[in-house]
Image (spheres, grey):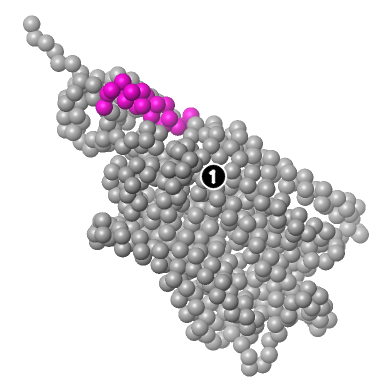
Amino acid sequence: MLINLSFANRQRQHSRCLLNRSGMRSELMSQGDKPRMTNTRALVPSGGRGSNGLYASMSSRILSPLLLLLSALLFFFALGNHQLQNSTEPRVAGIATEMHLSGNWITPKLNDQPFLEKPPMSVWLDAAAIRIFGPEPWSVRLASACAGLLGVLLLYSMLRRFGRPASVAWVAAFMLATQASFWSNSRQVGEDALLALGVATALLAFFHASNRLRSDAFSIRPWLLFALGIAVATLSKGVLGLAMPGAVIFAVLVCESLQHKRMVLADWLRPAMFTLLGLTPLLCWLCFLYSQGGVQALKDVLWTNSVGRFSGSFEEAGHYEPAYYYLTKLPEAFLPWNVLVYLGLWHLRKQLMANRYLLFFTLWLSAQFLLLSLASSKRMVYLMSLAPAAAVIAAEYAFVLGERLQARSSDSSFAALISRNQKAIIAAGVVLITAGYLSAALWLVPRADRQSLLPLTDKVHALQLQGRQVALFQPSERLAGASVFYSQRLLETLASDTQLNSFLANADKNVAVMESLQVPRPPLRIIDSVKVGERSYYFVSQAPMAVDN
């Protein structure tokens, strides 16, 4: 059962008793004082706290290493058994490779042209991994995998600091690691896992810091962690990395101001001040970027690719969907735990105003969901930053269901059977779920290699070994990125038919790679072709000139 502050005095006294046993001080409301919230232990599901709770006999000394082991397996197992897939992986890997080859760590480039869609944190990490481990698919996925692992461990650690039992924190962290979208995106090249880590770090640190303030125990460490989260989020995704935690913090402060019927200026100034500290790394990079690209480079990264994508004014960005797009995607969001998330939100709704802990994670979900729905550009991967909050709601509701099951065990033989064997059932579920994800990583994910550009880049490399110069004709971002990553050299790019004809006429051995829906016609001569999925790529050279008799 959830204990509400408005319950009878007997229940409130029992709650205080539990707090005193755990060595934690109750924070009671007093007339004329700033309202304070009772510790979260007394306001959230009690499962796992008492001797009859789920996992009651399992200590954090067992759960912590187990979580680390399972999470490491989930994120790193078979990380390199498949090639670069979809359109994002080759593009980002190609940008990182160009950064590694050129030594220019300020301006990300693709096809030797500035690529300023996002700040370069993920590209920095990928380029460093290429330099250390070589150009392997697993090396450019390391940053995302590490971000996913750190996000899971961070959630577990912070929930323990919030006073939640080890069992609840463990289940929430495991649910985060096994959310299908979170798991898959943490095993791909890209910046979304880093963004999710930065947002989670900032928000969890903010909540921890504000809890310390309510107990009159100000500490600088949570605020420095908050600033670190802002730095990671903004260096990964720019303005969006600031907006995602900012929307939640704004909603929390507004709710508290309305609840207390007054606005405490210091509560608003502290996160604003440490946000400025967290923006320092981004501002430093922008200064270096300005020295290389001028005002236009700053406009591209701060306005065109941030505000433009949100408002829809940057039409070339794509992914434009109606405002209700994410509502239609709710059945597949947060799988396989989405039913627990939605039922949990409904069940816990009456506790929110009396329970700052549940209110915070509910606002985390709702504020970011609203922000993303208002944006013109929409993709399912953007919901990754909501995953930690969804995992917490799902875990808390799962323990509510566990308490209900135990309460009915005396009246139902089925409930009694489940209660007696709950540890074995949960352990079996953890093993089966983990095995399912590992099996998918080992056998299912590599099946997408049929769409890989590796066969094409192998042919490019073979032609280069023959001493032939190869160029790309109007390449897509995917082709340009894959070619530089796999060949470890920057290929010349031909932007027009005139440049194509001039390049091919310059030497008989010159070859151009072109993607075309139609078979190239003379004066082009096809010397080879590769089909990747539904796309056809042709290797063409200049047709020999006819000799008049």
Q: Give coordinates of residue 536: x percent, y percent.
A: 36, 27
Q: Give coordinates of residue 484: x percent, y percent.
A: 36, 37
Residue position for label 1? 187
Residue 414 left/right relative to 477: right
When asked about the image quadrant of residue 394, the answer is bottom right
Q: Residue at x 28, y 23 (%)?
A: 467
Name the main secondary structure of what is drawn in magenta: helix
Q: Judge the density around disc 1: few (<14), some (14-19), many (≥20) Cα neighbours within 10 Å.
A: many
**Residue 321 visible to the viewer:** no
Q: Where 549 falls versus 469 (above or below)?
A: above
Q: Where 346 falls versus 209 (above or below)?
A: above
Magenta span = 450-469
Residue 15 left/right relative to 523: right
When asked about the image quadrant of residue 58, the answer is bottom right
Q: Residue at x 58, y 66 (%)?
A: 204
Q: Give coordinates of residue 341: x percent, y percent.
A: 64, 58
Q: Residue at x 77, y 50 (%)?
A: 426
Q: Nearer the viewer, residue 360 or 141?
A: 141
